[in-house]
């Protein structure tokens, strides 16, 4: 184990732990209500929202899986993340203010709350909630994987033999810390830690894109190395797109962009903001992180040029940690791995809170204990956030790591299937609830089947054209919903009643909450 | 429940109606980026970056500026 690197790592880990608990004092709102614990009272302004959403959306997937895809397979599977994270923001600008307004107006905490009222259907709301939780679980597991790989790169032994059992002590410690401050502070914890995370990641980014290319003889050499790898017969690697892969590239980019804000944790960041303009401003400000992602993706090519030997046991995902260890003095490597781990903690906290919110509101209170009061509601949410994280921990410990990333890809295909109910629902209630439910089911089954048939890959050829399965599945879903709507109307299975009013979606009627500033935690 | 919009809000909404077409600007990045034949080339290179890479990175900035413009025009 490298002590110097480990001490730097431990220092920053302790720092964010303290911050996580301080966040409970931020604004002494009543943390025993779900909108205070799970939505921070909807009082975040532009700056806090920028850090929170940036910390929440750019996850271990960005820091580990995207550069690893660039290293292993190249542009198609890695660099699509750049157009993806470009196109997501115009979509946010158009869609999310409507979502915010209607949720604010009716005090909705989750997308399923909205769907239930909009289509008058508890069943459809259950499907939305279930899909959200199902898609979030492997995403949290991927964050744990990010922490695991950082610990491995520091040379920390991952398992300790206690009384004859191999137990993942370091990961368990990280998990307990995360669970404890999420439990006490709710959404304010990841919001506060996100500030530290984002600053650390930007420091690591600047160091890597200045120091590593200068060691490797400039970006020209780095791209030449990638080109050479692409020209090696049988490498299966591409540094430009083959013309047969254009549709795959664009459907990956567009599909991922549309799906991102269907995830409960992304909606959490939007709903926690205090007015519509905060969301619109952030649509113009968040692309700074996309630029960061684009350069971090190139770490994959730098690892090729540096001819690193990937960290054993993690496949292509071991390449970037090996590159960091090889390129920097050990204290800075410790800092970089702390940045990656904290970078995984923020989304893990937000994801578990979001999954807990929707479980509590749309499954527990809706179907199990309809008489639960506000206090019980938030108590259940806190416990569920713990259970969800623990489930993710078991997942990462007992399921091979390659599978973890596959499940996350599958999660992207699943979450896309709530698009007709949630996003189209913001604009129209023309769809019949039963048609939406059948479309959803068909999309889930078709998407999962394609994923398995393709050999656990997210690209599958339709009519000979390879494309992202989330897109082909949601097209099937939409077609069925559209065709079956008139059928159900004709046989008398009517639309549900709509509890929302057209004006609920508009800016003029959107009330603004008083702003909550970061300094307040320390006063 | 919904409160009535103030008069200043109503005037602003009137002015905004005339500028709604600016929202079409947000479609530009989709047209450019979802058509790889526009940028799937190695040349011209810039600072060692093949065109494919620097062009898409440049569009991060351009799209942010477009979004900021649309925000500034208040549509």
Image (cartoon, coloured by chain):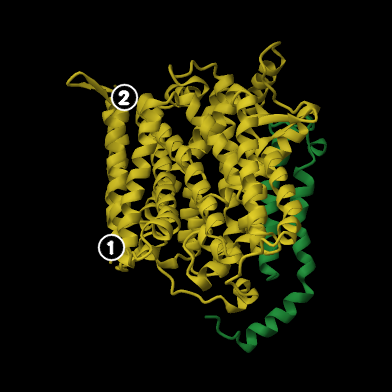
Chain colours: A yellow, B green
Residue A322: quadrant of the picture: top left
Classify the position of the C terminus of chain A by image quarter. Answer: bottom left
- Chain label for disc 1: A
Return the mark for residue A492. none
- Chain label for disc 2: A
Q: Looking at the image, how many numbered discs can be counted on the residues?
A: 2
Front-lying residue, A488 or A173: A488
Q: Is residue A247 left or right of residue A51?
A: right
Q: Is residue A119 above or below residue B27?
A: below
Which residue is located at x 60 percent, y 23 percent? A217
Report if residue A85 is visible in the image: no
Residue A495: quadrant of the picture: bottom right
Circle 1 crowding by C-alpha within 10 Å: few under 14, some 14–19, many from 20 = some
Circle 2 crowding by C-alpha within 10 Å: few under 14, some 14–19, many from 20 = some
Q: Secondary structure at mark 2?
A: loop
Q: Position of residue A463 (x, y in %)?
A: 80, 30
Which residue is located at x 65 percent, y 31 percent? A450
Which residue is located at x 71 percent, y 10 percent? A233
Return the mark for residue A25. 1
Q: Do callouts 1 and 2 point to residues on the same chain? A: yes
Q: Position of residue B44 (x, y in %)?
A: 79, 33
Q: Position of residue A238 (x, y in %)?
A: 70, 23
Q: Which residue is mark 2?
A: A158
Q: Is residue B47 above or below residue A40?
A: above
Which residue is located at x 42 percent, y 53 percent? A359
Classify the position of the N terminus of chain A by image quarter. Answer: top left
């Amino acid at each position: 184990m490298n002590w110097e690197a480990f001490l730097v790592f431990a220092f920053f880990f302790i720092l964010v732990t303290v911050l996580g608990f301080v966040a409970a004092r931020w604004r002494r709102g009543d943390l025993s209500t779900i909108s205070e614990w799970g939505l921070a009272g909807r009082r975040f302004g532009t700056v806090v929202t920028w850090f929170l959403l940036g910390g929440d959306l750019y996850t271990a997937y960005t820091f580990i899986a995207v550069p690893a895809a660039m290293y292993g397979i190249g542009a198609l599977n890695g660099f699509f993340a750049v157009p993806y994270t470009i196109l997501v923001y115009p979509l946010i600008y158009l869609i999310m203010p409507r979502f915010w307004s209607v949720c604010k107006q009716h005090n909705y905490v989750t997308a399923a709350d909205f769907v239930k009222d909009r289509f008058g259907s508890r069943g459809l709301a259950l499907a939305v909630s279930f899909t959200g939780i199902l898609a979030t679980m492997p995403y949290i597991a991927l964050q744990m994987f990010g922490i695991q790989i950082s610990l491995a790169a520091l040379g920390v032994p991952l398992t300790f033999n206690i009384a004859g059992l191999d137990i993942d002590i370091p990961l368990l410690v990280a998990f307990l810390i995360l669970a404890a401050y999420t439990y006490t502070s709710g959404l304010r914890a990841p919001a506060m830690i996100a500030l530290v995370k984002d600053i650390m990641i930007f420091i690591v980014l600047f160091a890597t894109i200045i120091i590593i290319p200068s060691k490797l003889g400039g970006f020209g050499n780095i791209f030449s190395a990638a080109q050479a790898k692409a020209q090696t017969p049988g490498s299966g690697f591409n540094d430009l797109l083959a013309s047969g892969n254009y549709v795959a590239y664009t459907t990956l980019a567009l599909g991922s962009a549309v799906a991102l804000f269907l995830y409960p944790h992304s909606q959490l960041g939007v709903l926690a903001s205090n007015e519509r303009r905060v969301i619109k401003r952030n649509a113009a400000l968040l692309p700074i992180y996309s630029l960061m992602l684009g350069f971090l993706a190139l770490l994959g090519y730098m690892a090729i040029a540096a001819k690193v030997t990937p960290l054993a046991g993690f496949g292509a995902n071991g390449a970037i940690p090996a590159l960091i260890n090889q390129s920097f003095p050990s204290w800075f490597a410790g800092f970089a791995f702390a940045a990656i781990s904290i970078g995984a903690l923020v989304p893990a906290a937000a994801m578990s809170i979001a999954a807990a919110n929707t479980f509590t509101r749309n499954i527990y209170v809706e179907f199990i204990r309809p008489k639960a009061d506000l206090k019980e509601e938030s108590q259940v949410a806190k416990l569920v956030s713990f259970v969800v994280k623990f489930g993710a921990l078991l997942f990462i410990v007992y399921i091979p790591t390659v599978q973890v990333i596959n499940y996350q890809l599958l999660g992207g295909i699943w979450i896309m299937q709530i698009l007709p109910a949630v996003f189209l629902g913001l604009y129209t209630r023309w769809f019949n609830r039963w048609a939406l439910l059948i479309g959803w089911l068909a999309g889930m089954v078709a998407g999962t089947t394609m994923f398995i048939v393709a050999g656990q890959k997210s690209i599958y050829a339709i009519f000979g054209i390879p494309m992202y399965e989330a897109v082909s599945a949601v097209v099937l879903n939409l077609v069925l919903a559209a065709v079956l709507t008139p059928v159900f109307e004709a046989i008398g299975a009517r639309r549900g009643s709509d509890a929302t009013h057209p004006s609920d979606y508009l800016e003029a009627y959107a009330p603004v909450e008083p702003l909550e500033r970061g300094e307040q935690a320390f006063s | 429940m919904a409160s009535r919009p103030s008069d200043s809000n109503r005037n602003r909404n009137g002015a905004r109606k005339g500028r709604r077409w600016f929202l079409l600007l947000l479609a530009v990045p989709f047209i450019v980026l979802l058509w790889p034949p526009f940028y799937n080339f190695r040349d011209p290179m810039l600072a060692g970056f093949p065109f494919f890479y620097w062009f898409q990175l440049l569009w991060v900035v351009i799209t942010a500026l477009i979004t900021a413009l649309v925000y500034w025009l208040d549509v």
